[in-house]
Amino acid sequence: MGIKPMVITLIVLSLWVGAAAAAVASPSPMETVRERIDQVIAVLNDPAGADSAHRAAQRDRLWEIASPMFDFVEISRRTVGPKWQEFSDDEKARFTDVFTRFLGNTYLDRVQGEYQNEKIEYVQELVREPLALVRTKLVREAVEMPIDYRMRQTDGQWKIYDILVENGVSIVQNYRVQFQSILQKESPAALIQRLEQRLEEQGR
Amino acid sequence: MTKPISLKAVLIAICLVALLSGCAGHRTKGPSDPTAAPAPTPTGVALSTADETTPPAGSDDMSLWEDDLDWNDEGAGVFYTVADPLEPFNRTMFVFNDKLYFWVLKPVAQGYRFAVPRPARSGVRNFFNNLGAPIRIANNILQGRFQTAEAEVARFLFNSTVGVLGFGNPAADVEGLNPEPTDLGLTLGHYGIGNGFYLVWPVLGPSTLRDSAGYFGDRWLNPTIYIDPIEASLAVFALRSINTVSFHIGDYEAIKSAALDPYQAMRDAYIQLRRSKLR
């Protein structure tokens, strides 16, 4: 008879311990971003990656570090906007895949090609669960560029779903404007094909 | 005698267009800062001022959530955008500015960047930013932002003296002396005047009807337009543009390569940027 309360106690206890462990294990939004960006900068500063022979390896390493920061499904959904409902499951998956690679290529090119000892200042962290805003500044030469990360918490993990530059220019909205105008005239499949074409042009 | 006169007429015509917007470099380079922006800091040193220059936390920061809520609530795909009835003309101007950047502005700015060391370029930038103080002071007053106007006056005095005619920017390290820049376009927006429609100027780049009107008004407070002869005034304008671009080589290229339709990407970036300054 005394076994039932004990089982319940055990379950409650394990849940509690589990929750506590999760709380300890999941870093804050700013910590999440800072940790990854620090690693990215460390890789960029590593002279081993400087010569062209190791460029591809460096690129893979950067992608490995940076990509888990982002929620690419959410990014895809938001850039497409309400038309997302008109995408079939297959189209959603293909779009997410091709857009992820497109973003990856575009921004890795930039990071790899133009890194000049930029410094990141971590300015502020605003949390309103499940959303958060991490405000940073990129300092290059004598120019500062505010970069803010919009993040969402899923399964205890904070992931970026939009980036704001210059205090409020949303990258997601910028793509949404472009995609929307394509989708007004063309099918989801055509949009996917255009992105694939751009990927080919990028040569990857 | 007729020859120099016609040359002058052409120069005046170019200058009129040019002066509608005081800083071509800012506009053609991308969404970095279309206003006569003072440099927030001349170096990355002013770490401590980062927080203070942001207006008291709360409403302003929270406004950055806006889009998110919009999207979730409506789901109708409504987002802030701008009318573009002149799109064919604008696209032509966009292509013109694109060529101008790659064929002229960029190579010249690269050479300039190579020849002129960074401190000197920062000095030039600071100097022109300092000259923009009257515009910012007047517009802050027009918007009823007297404290910000005061900060602009204080910075102007400080940088003009301690900063040696504005070539230095010692105010960057002083708390409360780094107000956000403003202009007449923003003043008009402050009083509820909308963008009107999107407009791409040759040389000057993205603007709107409202912001063009703002530029036309602001230019009266820009000392460099009163330089005589007009050729010298244009040379000053060119120097400022080249100097600005020298800090931003690669930015426009990045926007372009990241876009499916660079024209739309620039238009949206401009509109979003101006709106964020109105918040």
Image (spheres, grey):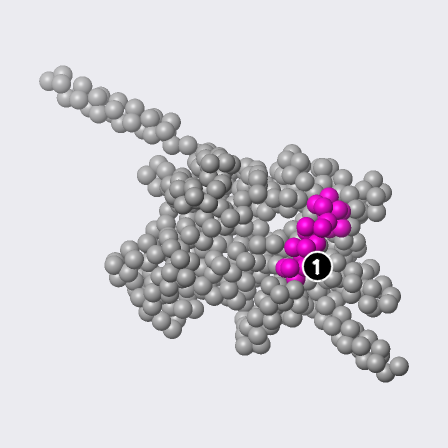
Q: Residue at x 43, y 43 (%)?
A: A53
**Which one is nearer the viewer's eye here, B114 or A19?**
B114
Q: Residue furthest right?
A: B1
Indicate whether B8 appears above or below B233: below
Q: Residue at x 86, y 83 (%)?
A: B2
Q: Residue at x 70, y 54 (%)?
A: B112
Q: Residue at x 33, y 58 (%)?
A: A95
**Quadrant housing residue A14:** top left
Measuring from the top left, give residue B85's x and y in whole percent: 55, 76
Quadrant showing the N terminus of chain A: top left
Residue tagged by mark 1? B241
State the extent of the magenta-drawn residues as a range.
B105-126
- Residue B191 seen in this snapshot: no
**Which one is nearer the viewer's eye here, B176 or A62?**
A62
**Quadrant housing residue B197:** bottom right
- Residue A110 seen in this snapshot: yes
How many other residues sit within 10 Å of disc 1, few (<14), some (14-19) or many (≥20)? many
Q: From the image, give the main secondary structure of the stretch colored magenta.
A: helix
Q: Residue furthest bottom?
A: B2
Residue B271 left/right relative to B236 = left
Kind of residue indicated by mark 1:
Ser
Check if residue B134 falls in the magenta segment. no
Quadrant showing the C terminus of chain A: bottom left
Measuring from the top left, give residue B40's x and y in whole percent: 67, 45
Measuring from the top left, give residue B160's x and y in whole percent: 83, 46
**Quadrant housing residue A16:** top left
Residue A125 left/right relative to B180 = left
Measuring from the top left, give residue B42's x and y in whole percent: 70, 43
